[in-house]
Every structure is written in structure tokens, then in C-alpha cells.
Amino acid sequence: MHTLNEKQIHILHVAEKLFGEKGFDGTSVRNIAKEAGINIAMVSYYFGSKEKMLESLILYRSNATKMELDTLAHQDLSPLEKLDKLVELYISRVHKNRCLYQIVHFELANNHRDLDFNAFIEVKKRNVAMVEQIVKQGQDAGVFRKDVNIALIPPTVIGLIFQFHTNREMYAEMFNLKSDAAFNHYIKNELTAHIKQTIKALLTHEV
């Protein structure tokens, strides 16, 4: 992926916001240009089409995750501390960018649009490799079990957070979460603690 300039990044941020509010199909390039305060011709020049813009947005977010994982891998922390940070990173990413995640998963599942996900898949593979590097540090230190499929850790975390968001109404009633602030607080604290406990159990306990 080529380096994006500030104007392109601004357009992508606006597009992400509108995709979240109106959905991908409900958002036009004209909507994005107007909200970004940029001529529609310039938006088309930068990205070509709405589909190409989505591809760029996905890569932009995926590469940002890779950079955070790389930073975490090289931090002077214990294996368990790194694992906690790893879980927090994925939860934060999914919670903050959940609309984009929903669009990506829908498009990957339906494959009815002309989207090139090859570059995105390659970045995801590199992200999984970074997770493997972090977990293997703990395995080499004798902290984590070695008979674990590390590649399934990210989808385990992502699946749990998605399940919570998808069934928000039920969980909000179950846990008395009457506001957005209460719901977000629960995710940041109780749900995050539960997911950390789950992943630690997977890596440290005999099954």
C-alpha cells in the first residue's frame, strides 16, 4: 500500500464515519466529498471509486494494527503482560472500528461486489504472524503451552466482542446497561477481563 497523504487520510476518516452511519450502500462518493469539504473530482482522483476507497480504508486500518502489534512484540514486558496488552489492542480496535469490521465481514461472506481483498488478506496474515511471535515468546519462556493454535486467538477475541455488540439489546437488559456510557464501560472493564481470562486459560491450563 502506498503512503497516504493527510488529505487522503481525512477522506478515509470521513468515509468510515459515513459508512458507519448510513452503511456502505447508503453512502455515495458525493456524500463523502461534501462531508470532507473536498471536490468530488478530487475524491475520485485519489480513490477512483467507492469500492477502491473501502479497500484503502481497510488496508489503512489493518496496517495500523500491524504497527501496534510490532510495537507490542518489542516492548520489555512479561509474556502475561504482553498477552493482556494484545487482548486490549484487539478489543479496542474492534470496538472502535466495529462498523468497518461489519462491512468487511459482510463483503467477504457475500462476495457480490467487485472488491480486491488480496492485499487485506496479506496484511491479516502478517498480523497473525505478529501475534504468533508474541505468544511464542511466552512459549519459549515456559509460560504458555505449545499445543495451541495461535492463529485462532484473534478470531476468538473478535468473535466474543462481535457477539456482545450484535446482541447488545439482550446484554444491556441482562447487565442493566442503560446508556452508551454504561455499555462501553462494561466492554472496557468486565468484558475485557473475561476475554483476558479466557485467552490466559487457553494458553496456560491443561485441557
Image (tube, rainbow, N blue to C red):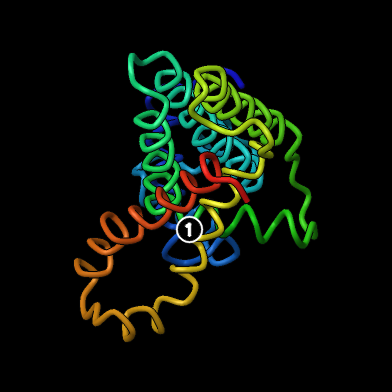
Q: Nearer the viewer, residue 56 or 136?
A: 136
| Quarter of the figure with residue 82 | top left
| Image quadrant occupied by the N terminus | top right
Q: In this view of the protein, which residue sits in the foreground, 166 or 58?
A: 166
Q: Nearer the viewer, residue 86 or 38?
A: 86
Please tell me whether residue 131 is drawn above or below residue 95 in the rendered image.
above
Confirm whether residue 55 shows in the render. yes
Provide the residue designation for mark 1.
99
**How many other residues sit within 10 Å of disc 1, few (<14), some (14-19) or many (≥20)?**
some
* Whole-percent x, y for residue 159 in the image: 56, 58
Q: Is residue 33 visible?
A: no
Q: Residue at x 73, y 54 (%)?
A: 108
Q: Position of residue 79 (x, y in %)?
A: 42, 26
Residue sitting at 32 percent across and 86 percent down? 173
Work out which residue is located at the far front of the displayed protein and give it.
Answer: 206
Q: Percent from the top left, x then y, of residue 135?
A: 54, 28
Looking at the image, residue 134 sits to the left or right of residue 76; the answer is: right
The residue nearer to you, when weighing 106 against 202, is 202
Q: x, y (%) of residue 202?
A: 55, 47
Q: Residue at x 39, y 54 (%)?
A: 95
Q: In the image, what residue type sits under mark 1?
A: Cys
Q: How many labels does the image show?
A: 1
* Residue found at x 33% / y 53%: 193
SS at badge 1? helix
